[in-house]
Amino acid sequence: MKEVIDNSINTSKNELDNKEVLKLLFNCIDLTSLYTEDSSDSIRDFVDKVNDLPKHFNYVPQVAAMCVYPVFAPVLKGALKAEGVNIAVVSAGFPSSQTFTDVKKLETQRAVDFGANEIDIVISVGEFQEGNYEFVGEEIHQIKSVMKDAHLKVILESGTLKDMEEIWLASMLSIESGADFIKTSTGKQQPAATFEAAYVMLNAIKHHHEKTGKKIGFKPAGGISTPEDALIYYQLVKDILGEEWLNNKLFRIGASRLANNLLTKIQELETGKQEEVKYF
Ligand SMILES: O=C[C@H](O)COP(=O)(O)O
């Protein structure tokens, strides 16, 4: 594992001035606002920024999705005009996942009814660690059953899992229970995303693909704020799963601070202007 990660870290440095790769990373961002202080007005302002992005940075592609609390699904549905940007919502008692399964289902169903087409949920970590795999798998399955065609991203909260074996097991359980994507972390718990967790999860996706032919997506999230770190996840995906995973159908980065830093770097490469972008 260490050798593969070290190798990906080294190779990723070659791409730091590659604007096409940096633009691809931007296009894989799930642009996130998950704050207690979020309001309809603040989320509407956030959406306006995404809608107006091409006016300010016409050389940058759009983000993949905006990711908000479920109560703001109708705000996104009403205000988001940018083409191709998905409406992602965290649900099912995010971030602790400590509520009743029927409440998780209702929250998810509401979010989908109000326009969410992507749902991010956290596994019941405590039950998983007690070995109640059937309960955890069935809960994911139950939540998926109320989502119509929306995509399901299942968060392992890998920083709470005790070793790589638990991360592997949680990955396989999530995939087998209906996850379209597996995601490392909520961003609300430390440690958040790590290269080691990514390595294990990517290998679980690879294993599932070899067994079934089905491609599951990967979303590292939590604490990823620099182009350098984003590039390492990009390189790990490329090295373990291959180029076919390098698009926003199969690779997302959940982040609240990465977009500005990528914009800063891309602007520098496009225009030669060396100034920090504080757009979002
Ligand atoms: O799913 C996305 C994460 O909550 C974002 O975490 P972050 O605020 O550390 O970028």
Image: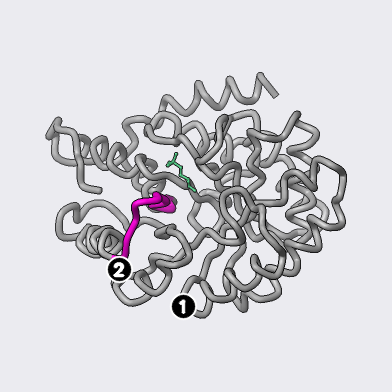
**Which quadrant would the N terminus be assigned to in this image?**
top right
10 Å neighbourhood of mark 2: few (<14), some, or many (≥20)? some
Quadrant in the rendering for residue 68: bottom left
| Above or below, 144 relative to 19 | below
Identify the residue position indicated by label 2 in the image: 82
Q: Identify which residue is drawn at 75% across, 66% down.
A: 141
Q: Is residue 32 visible in this depiction of the protein?
A: no
Asked whether residue 115 is drawn in magenta, I would say no
| Above or below, 34 relative to 44 | above
Quadrant in the rendering for residue 193: top right
Color scheme of the displayed model: one colour
Label 1: which secondary element: loop
Q: Which mark, by number, is residue 267?
A: none
The location of residue 86, given as percent across then percent down, is: 43, 66
- Give the residue type that dot 2 points to: Ala
Query: Which of the pair 263/257 is nearer the observer?
Result: 257
Q: Identify which residue is drawn at 67% across, 45% down.
A: 156
Q: Which label sits in the foreground, 1 or 2?
A: 1
**Span of residues in magenta:** 29-40
Image side of residue 88 versus residue 163, left or right: left
Q: Is residue 29 visible in this depiction of the protein?
A: yes
- Give the residue type that dot 1 points to: Phe
Label 2: which secondary element: loop
Q: Identify which residue is drawn at 73% across, 46% down.
A: 171
Count numbered badges in the picture: 2
Image side of residue 90 versus residue 106, left or right: left
The location of residue 195, given as percent across then percent down, is: 59, 30
Give the CA separation, mark 1 to mark 2. Answer: 18 Å
Q: Which mark, by number, is residue 114?
A: 1
| Above or below, 116 relative to 243 | below
10 Å neighbourhood of mark 1: few (<14), some, or many (≥20)? some
| Above or below, 155 relative to 129 | below
